[in-house]
């Protein structure tokens, strides 16, 4: 076990910085291996900090080349420099100027933090603590400064030079082949929002007039020749800007807004002020290379990063414990945007599927933590589904509780009051408490208490009195570091439906005009009066709280909701609940009656006859069974992934056979259109057609193979081509292998498309996949140093292939462990993200559990692990009861 555990940072230890930086002037001379950075800081002691203390600046692998205080070079005795810090023992007690010269090697920077190179271009990533890899600095989010950046480079190597803020000046340096550009950002910002780019890039742009009439140029820079693939992203950016003005009253504030797409990036994108840097996967799209899901992701991530300009940049975070303040809020904002641009119920279902698959899973694992953690060892490990997705659910619950108007007033007050500052979760809640006069202290527990609350809901109808009582109980299971749990404030949006499917008007004073009951205690009951027949309750409409619900509803009642509920989310949820009950029984060897097997099938048939064509995207979701990972999570302990795989396959086959003619009818009537459009309605039709093909194939492999092959050959877009290839990969044989080979041939020069090819093969649920994955690691398109490639092949194997990653012989775990160790030497963030695939290990049956433990221990025993991997492996093994 690792002994050199990194120092723990605690929220309770926060204190303001002892020094402030008002202005930063950077002069960056780009060079592949020896970039010289001269930083001039206008500093002063912080009146809120301690006096007479040394000045300690953060560094990370930087080389100090020169140091001057108020233009006087410092003697060696006056400071101490290491790659990790620069300490000036007796700094002035009044404002002073510090000039620091550093030298860095962007080509050797494989961590992709700080200044690095991607396909020869220079780019940066500074959140959370990457700026200290460029120069020594007070690299913390509550030190806000105004930046001016001069970038100099070889004109051939880097004709485009971009920085934060507005362009000020540019020109050639005579006789050197070099040129420069100066950028000035008037908005004070923390160092994590700093960015620069230098390289050969193509550009698409358009003018944008803001709500107050200011002219802005919005532009996207991509690899030359791929400009037309950025059109959709540019359009999404424009729509995001309009939405933020119309719906939130937020206007853009600089003269230019630039986005740069790069191919080596640790995450999706980064919201640097005025200069967003993106993983090219979330910018580049054409019908031939991107799927409907890619288009939707591009739209959402473009919006997300743009929205950060207010929720994150204008109002930033005091410290990294407040990360959810910008991330949870901004996810909520991008979800609302996508819901407005697309179908709200369909988007809500997609959000909840993601939340359950990632956040509920995390909360049930050794990595569970509160939305606002109270301590960390490596902050990069806290960019999690809990901070992002559950963080967004908290904002959504707040809106549900206080209503739309007060929510908007609270947001406006928060922005107005906190603009230009580094804020806390308390500042955020205070704005809403003030506009509503509510005490939100109990509600704030959502930020501090980890774990997914479990709710049970029981209904009692009394025919004699015409009343209907609903009993609610909540309980949150223990999580690491938190054994005793308190009740949460839980908004329950609900309604009653009659057995014959009519909405019931029922009186209950505890349910407000918006149909919401607020549960504040561990147990509570509400009673409806004037009820003439037994109702079916529809609770947690729209998934009004991030909780697990156990409902004592019969299959028949659930199917009433599927057919008739006015809430689309609960219609979908009802079908999922019926399917899940049967899938769990099948997976765990419990008896499944004929009736159970057939009831969902007949409900599906009725649904297809009457409803499915009204909203194909929604229908596709209804016809898709819970995933193997969802079923494993529902079972929760002693999980056997092979049994789950068999159960899901059997049920798909049964449903496919029972609905065969209708599915075939759907498949043929929703034929491909000649012209591809990524809009939600067209995407919905494709989704339904491909969901039908999946069930048809489960029912009749030969027929499915024939249809899928034909679709694969004739597809006019990537969505249909990839869906058919995915279906073919489930059928062993030459048809599949030929399709895999032809796809590779067709897209051999398209790395982002080959990523999809890697993913599909890594997800094949058969024993030979392990060797296939190892072989694909030798493929010329694969590279262990490129995060997209590694995530597509290895990440998909570990996260999507339940049966092969969790092989009973432990070989899946061993493969991942060895790759994590290899990746860790180059890129710790990438390695630790891969390692989180082990988060389900404790819920496996004992043989698999032992193999997983051994694999984790083999990582933990290594010396020189990064802080990132060391932290995840230690937390994964903590509180591991010996067996
Ligand atoms: N704020 C960045 C994520 C930074 C991750 C640093 N490890 C992108 C985003 O959430 O918008
Ligand atoms: Zn974000």
Image: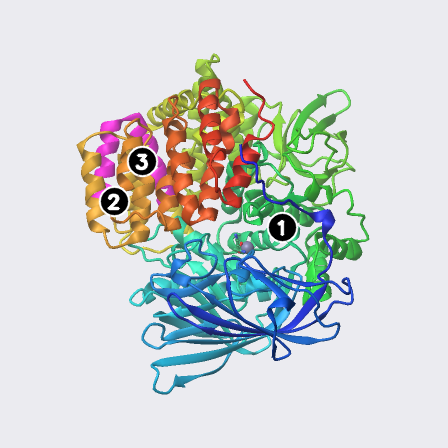
Q: Left or right of 77: which side holds 778?
A: left
Mark 2: which secondary structure?
Answer: loop
Please tell me in which quadrant of the rendered image residue 834 appears. top left
Q: Mark 2 or mark 3, which is nearer to you?
A: 2
The residue that appears at 22% across and 28% down in the rendered structure is 702
The tag on residue 369 is: none
The residue that appears at 77% across and 62% down in the rendered structure is 50
**Segment colored magenta:** 686-713
Mark 1: which secondary structure?
Answer: helix
Q: Main secondary structure of the magenta part?
A: helix
* Residue of label 1: 324
Q: Of the residues under marks 1 and 3, which one precedes in the sequence?
A: 1
362 to 236, vertically: above or below = above
* Residue of label 2: 779
The residue that appears at 36% across and 72% down in the rendered structure is 158
The tag on residue 693 is: 3
Q: Of the residues under marks 2 and 3, which one precedes in the sequence?
A: 3
Where is residue 426 shown, x and y percent of the image? 74, 53
Label 2, ligand 1: CB separation under 8 Å: no
Between marks 2 and 3, how big is the CA–CA gap?
Answer: 31 Å
Where is residue 450 shown, x and y percent of the image? 65, 37
């Amino acid at each position: 076990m690792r002994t050199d555990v990194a120092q723990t940072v605690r929220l309770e230890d926060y204190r303001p910085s002892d020094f402030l930086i008002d202005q930063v002037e950077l002069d960056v001379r780009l060079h592949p291996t020896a970039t010289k950075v001269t930083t001039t800081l206008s500093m002063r002691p912080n009146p809120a900090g301690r006096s007479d203390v040394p000045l300690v600046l953060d560094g990370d692998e930087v080389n100090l080349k020169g140091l001057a205080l108020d233009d006087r070079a410092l003697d060696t005795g006056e400071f101490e420099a290491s790659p990790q810090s620069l300490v000036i023992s007796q700094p002035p007690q009044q404002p002073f100027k510090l000039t620091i010269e550093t030298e860095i090697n962007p080509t050797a920077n494989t961590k992709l933090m700080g200044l690095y190179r991607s396909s020869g271009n220079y780019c940066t990533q500074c959140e959370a603590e990457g700026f200290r890899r460029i120069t020594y600095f007070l690299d913390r989010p509550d030190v806000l400064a105004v930046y001016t950046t001069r970038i100099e480079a070889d004109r051939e190597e880097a004709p485009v030079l971009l920085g934060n803020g507005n362009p000020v000046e540019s020109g050639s340096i005579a006789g050197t082949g070099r040129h420069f550009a100066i950028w000035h950002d008037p908005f004070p910002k923390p160092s994590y929002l700093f960015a620069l780019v230098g390289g050969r890039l193509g550009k698409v742009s358009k003018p944008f007039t803001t709500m107050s009439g200011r002219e802005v140029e919005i532009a996207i820079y991509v690899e030359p020749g791929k400009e037309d693939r950025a059109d959709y992203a540019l359009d999404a950016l424009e729509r995001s800007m309009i939405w933020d003005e119309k719906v939130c009253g937020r206007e853009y504030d600089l003269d230019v807004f630039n986005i740069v797409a790069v191919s080596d990036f640790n995450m999706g994108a980064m919201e640097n002020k005025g200069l967003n840097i993106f993983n090219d996967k979330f910018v580049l799209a054409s019908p031939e290379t991107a799927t409907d899901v890619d288009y939707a992701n591009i739209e959402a991530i473009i919006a997300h990063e743009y929205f950060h300009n207010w929720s994150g940049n204008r109002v930033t975070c005091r410290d990294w414990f407040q990360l959810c303040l910008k991330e949870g809020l901004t996810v909520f904002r991008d979800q609302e945007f996508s819901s407005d641009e697309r179908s709200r119920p369909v988007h809500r279902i997609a959000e909840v599927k993601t939340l359950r698959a990632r956040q509920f899973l995390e909360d049930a694992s050794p990595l569970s933590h509160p939305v606002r953690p109270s301590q960390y060892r490596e902050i990069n490990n806290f960019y999690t589904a809990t901070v992002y997705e559950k963080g967004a659910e908290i904002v959504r619950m707040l809106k549900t509780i206080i209503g739309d108007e007060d929510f908007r007033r609270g947001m406006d007050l928060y922005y107005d009051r906190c603009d230009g500052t580094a804020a806390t979760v308390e500042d955020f809640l205070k704005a809403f408490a003030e506009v509503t006069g509510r005490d939100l202290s109990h509600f704030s527990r959502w930020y501090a208490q980890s774990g997914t609350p479990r709710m049970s809901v029981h209904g009692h109808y009394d025919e004699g009195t015409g009343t209907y009582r609903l009993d609610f109980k909540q309980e949150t299971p223990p999580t690491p570091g938190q054994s005793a749990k308190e009740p949460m404030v839980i908004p329950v949006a609900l309604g009653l439906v009659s057995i014959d499917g009519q909405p019931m008007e029922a009186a209950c004073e505890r349910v407000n005009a918006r149909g919401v009951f607020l549960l504040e205690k561990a147990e509570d009951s509400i009673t409806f009066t004037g009820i003439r027949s037994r109702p079916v309750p529809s609770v947690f409409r729209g998934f009004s709280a991030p909780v697990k619900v156990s409902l004592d509803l019969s299959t028949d009642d659930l199917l009433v909701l599927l057919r008739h509920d006015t809430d689309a989310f609960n219609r979908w949820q009802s079908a999922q609940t019926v399917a899940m009950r049967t899938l769990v029984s099948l997976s765990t060897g419990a008896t499944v009656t004929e009736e159970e097997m057939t009831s969902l099938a007949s409900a599906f048939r009725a649904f297809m006859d009457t409803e499915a064509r009204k909203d194909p995207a929604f229908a596709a979701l209804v016809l898709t069974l819970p995933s193997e990972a969802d079923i494993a999570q529902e079972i929760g302990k002693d999980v056997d992934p092979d049994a789950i795989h068999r159960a899901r396959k059997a049920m798909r086959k049964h449903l496919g056979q029972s609905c065969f003619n209708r599915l075939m009818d759907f498949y043929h009537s929703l034929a491909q259109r000649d012209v591809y459009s990524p809009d939600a309605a067209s995407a919905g039709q494709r989704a339904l057609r491909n969901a039908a093909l999946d069930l048809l194939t489960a029912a009749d492999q030969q027929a499915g193979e024939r249809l899928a092959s034909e679709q694969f050959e004739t597809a006019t877009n990537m969505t249909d081509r990839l869906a058919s290839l995915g279906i073919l990969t489930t059928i062993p044989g030459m048809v599949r292998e030929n399709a895999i080979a032809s796809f590779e041939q067709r897209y051999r020069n398209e790395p982002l498309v080959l990523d999809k090819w890697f993913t599909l093969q890594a997800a094949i649920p058969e024993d030979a996949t392990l060797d296939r994955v190892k072989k694909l690691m030798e493929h010329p398109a694969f590279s262990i140093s490129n995060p997209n490639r590694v995530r597509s092949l290895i990440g998909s194997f570990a996260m999507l292939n339940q049966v092969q990653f969790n092989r009973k012989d432990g070989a899946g775990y061993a493969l991942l462990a060895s790759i994590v160790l290899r990746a860790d030497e180059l890129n710790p963030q990438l390695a630790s993200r891969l390692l989180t695939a082990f988060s389900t290990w404790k819920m496996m049956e004992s043989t698999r559990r032992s193999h997983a433990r051994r694999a984790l221990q083999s990582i933990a025993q290594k010396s020189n692990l990064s802080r990132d991997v060391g932290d995840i492996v230690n937390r994964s093994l903590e509180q591991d009861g010996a067996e």
